[in-house]
Image (spheres, rainbow, N blue to C red):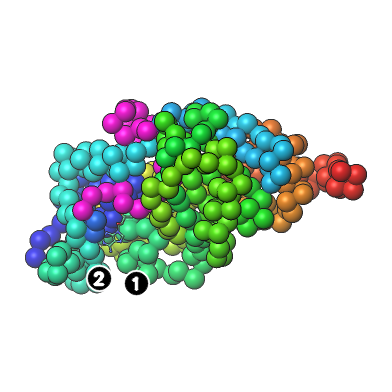
Amino acid sequence: MESYDVAVIGAGPAGVMAAWKAAESHARTVLIEREPSPGKKVCAEGVLADALVDAELKPSSEFVSNYISGAVLYAPDEQKKVNVGGEGYILDKPAFLRVLADRAEKAGSETRFETSVENVERKDGLVEIRTKKGGESSLVRARIVIGCDGTGSVLARRFFPRKNYQAITALQYSMTDCVVEDESKLEIYVGHEKAPAGYIWMFPKGKGDANVGIGVKGAGAKVLLDRFIENHPRVFGSAKIERTLAAPVPVGGEAESCVADNMMLCGDAASQVIPLTGAGIHTGLVAGKIAGEEAAISALKGNVSAENLQRYRDRFDKLWGERISNSLRALDSFERFSDNELNIITGLLEGQDLVEMANGFSPTKAVALMARHPLLALKVAYQLLTG
Ligand SMILES: Cc1cc2nc3c(=O)[nH]c(=O)nc-3n(C[C@H](O)[C@H](O)[C@H](O)COP(=O)(O)OP(=O)(O)OC[C@H]3O[C@@H](n4cnc5c(N)ncnc54)[C@H](O)[C@@H]3O)c2cc1C
């Protein structure tokens, strides 16, 4: 049986960073991924520019499909829109993850593709990980295992409380031949009729290609997305759907616990996602990075207790904890507005309010303004009565 200091399950954004940082910190590291290559999971591939800074990568045409200069948020009636600034990228996510996985390998991490983790057990102060490749089982031993295996995480389901783990369904079409007004802008459409408690997105990849998707609570995502496409013939009249994929997005705020003796969870497995936007690439990259560093330090010192590994959670929360919980509150508030109210509110918001709110920076500016400011509440009521 092969032995490592750190075993990482899953080569998504969290896993490739965790493996890189652990190996770079001189831990004997293995990265185990069930797919033949990284990035098979569906994703709209949008990130703000800071995500690459945190990934310690310069933007490159090798893995950036399109450069973004901001977003346009459409009110439910699409009469009003808010322009939001913010530089970012639409990644070619498989290529991006490949670059990060190669970097982990160069730092000394061993990568095992087409290898599925079937089970994890604690034994004699270590963990034993049962894997399967092409029908053959084998065991890997490690001091610490980092579960970066997404929403269905084997490690999370077996060892961590999951009762507050909430996920919504997201469905996406990879489309070609779309007629997009401005390919440097993300387009977001809200409204309970269009996307109950969620939103529809169109992220342009350039040359008429786009990721067009919907995230909603409950069933009916396909019917709603098809209706949206049908209602926008100017954009989608000649467009083709190349691929249809769906996956869950955790939107309930951070999991109550993401460390245990010998174990850590990162990214979607720990629900480290911005609830209002469903964005989890940047948070996953940062979580993986910190977890990899802390796992290496703890494994090499021989102290793999939950108490010691808690440093990972504390460091992550210092950077993202408040943003995630603020965004969760903003999501709760948004769900309470009707489409009519959202139409009015969209007219009252400025782009920056929206960015701050969606990314979970202090929601006092926007949500509190809308929900609690007496003057604004009056204005909303007045416009509803007279409009
Ligand atoms: C439709 C959709 C659109 C999205 N759009 C965006 C967006 O535009 N921007 C953004 O920031 N976020 C977006 N997200 C969220 C984002 O994709 C995730 O938050 C992010 O990928 C989480 O990274 P992760 O590393 O935690 O997990 P994942 O990316 O889910 O990676 C987990 C990896 O673990 C592997 N794995 C799972 N189980 C096992 C096992 N038993 N053994 C071995 N390997 C295993 C999987 O194959 C996978 O490679 C979107 C999500 C969806 C569903």
The residue under the point 43% across, 44% down is 240
The residue under the point 17% across, 47% down is 109
The quarter of the rendered structure image containing the N terminus is: bottom left
Residue 209 sits in quarter: top left
Residue picked out by circle 1:
158
Residue 348 in view (yes/no)? yes
Given residues 36 and 8, the one toward you in this image is: 36
The quarter of the rendered structure image containing the C terminus is: top right
Question: Which residue type carries mark 2?
Answer: Asn
The residue under the point 32% across, 67% down is 154
Q: Are marks 2 and 1 in contact (CB under 8 Å)?
A: yes
Residue picked out by circle 2:
119
The magenta-colored residue range is 36-65
Disc 1 CB within 8 Å of nearest ligand 1 atom: no
Kind of element beneath mark 2: strand
Give percent across and percent down for residue 328. 59, 53
Given residues 198 and 193, the one toward you in this image is: 193
Classify residue 247 as left or right of residue 336: left
Give percent across and percent down for residue 305. 31, 62
Magenta: main secondary structure: loop
Classify residue 323 as left or right of residue 148: right
Disc 2 CB within 8 Å of nearest ligand 1 atom: no
The residue under the point 51% across, 63% down is 166
Compared with residue 193, is residue 186 higher up or lower down, i.e. above or below?
above
Question: Which residue type carries mark 1?
Answer: Arg
Classify residue 141 as left or right of residue 333: left
Compared with residue 77, is residue 227 higher up or lower down, i.e. above or below?
below
What's the distance in space between the residues labelled 2 and 1, CA to CA?
8 Å
Q: Is residue 357 magenta?
A: no
